[in-house]
Structure formats: C-alpha cells, structure tokens
C-alpha cells in the first residue's frame, strides 16, 4: 500500500513539475536564450518537483520488497 502511495505522489509531483516547465517555455518568446531558460528552471523549486517525482517513481518500480525463500515453484 505504501508503494502505491509513493508512486501516486511521485506521479503528482512530476505533473506539477512538467506543467511549470512547459509554462516557463514562454520565456523563450521573450528573448531568453535556451541556456538561460535551462538555468532558470534549474533554480525553480516547482520545476525540480519533476525530477523528485521521477526519482520516486523509479525507486518504487525498481525496488522489490518481496523476500525469496527458495521454495517458490
């Protein structure tokens, strides 16, 4: 049950983060260069939610908490 909670929490954080990243793409039309845009979103906490959410989902998917007893057929 906790794995489902952390998966959904990570998914929600990714949605929030990528929404802001896409929204901040408007800065490119105001004259920012692409590198300035990347530096800007790297500093913003709401954009870092995308990476935090991705890491949470990756950890939930890649870890296996089952114990193997050797007698499973």
Image (cartoon, grey):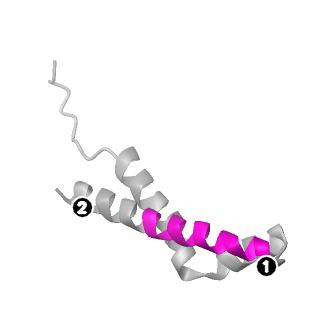
Q: Which residue is mark 1?
A: 30
- How many numbered discs? 2
Disc 1 residue crowd, few under 14, some 14–19, many 20+, Cα 10 Å: few
Q: Which residue is mark 2?
A: 5
User: Would you identify the image quadrant in which residue 8 lies?
Assistant: bottom left
Which SS type dominates the magenta stretch? helix
Q: Is residue 57 magenta?
A: no
Q: Is residue 27 magenta?
A: yes
Q: Is residue 26 above or below residue 5?
A: below
Question: In the figure, is residue 71 to the left or right of 10?
Answer: left
Q: Residue furthest top?
A: 73
Residue at 85% in and 72% down: 33
Report the magenta residues as a range: 14-29
- Return the disc, 2 or 1, that comes first in the chain's sequence: 2
State how far apart marks 2 and 1 are (Cα).
Answer: 39 Å
Disc 2 residue crowd, few under 14, some 14–19, many 20+, Cα 10 Å: few
Which x, y percent locates residue 46?
A: 52, 78
Which x, y percent locates residue 73?
A: 16, 18
């Amino acid at each position: 049950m906790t794995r489902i909670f952390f998966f959904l929490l990570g998914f929600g954080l990714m949605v929030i983060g990528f929404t802001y990243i896409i929204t901040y793409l408007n800065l490119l039309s105001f004259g920012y260069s692409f590198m300035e845009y990347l530096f800007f979103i790297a500093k913003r906490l709401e954009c870092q939610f995308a990476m935090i959410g991705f890491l949470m989902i990756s950890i939930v998917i890649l870890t296996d908490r089952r114990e193997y007893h050797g007698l499973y057929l």
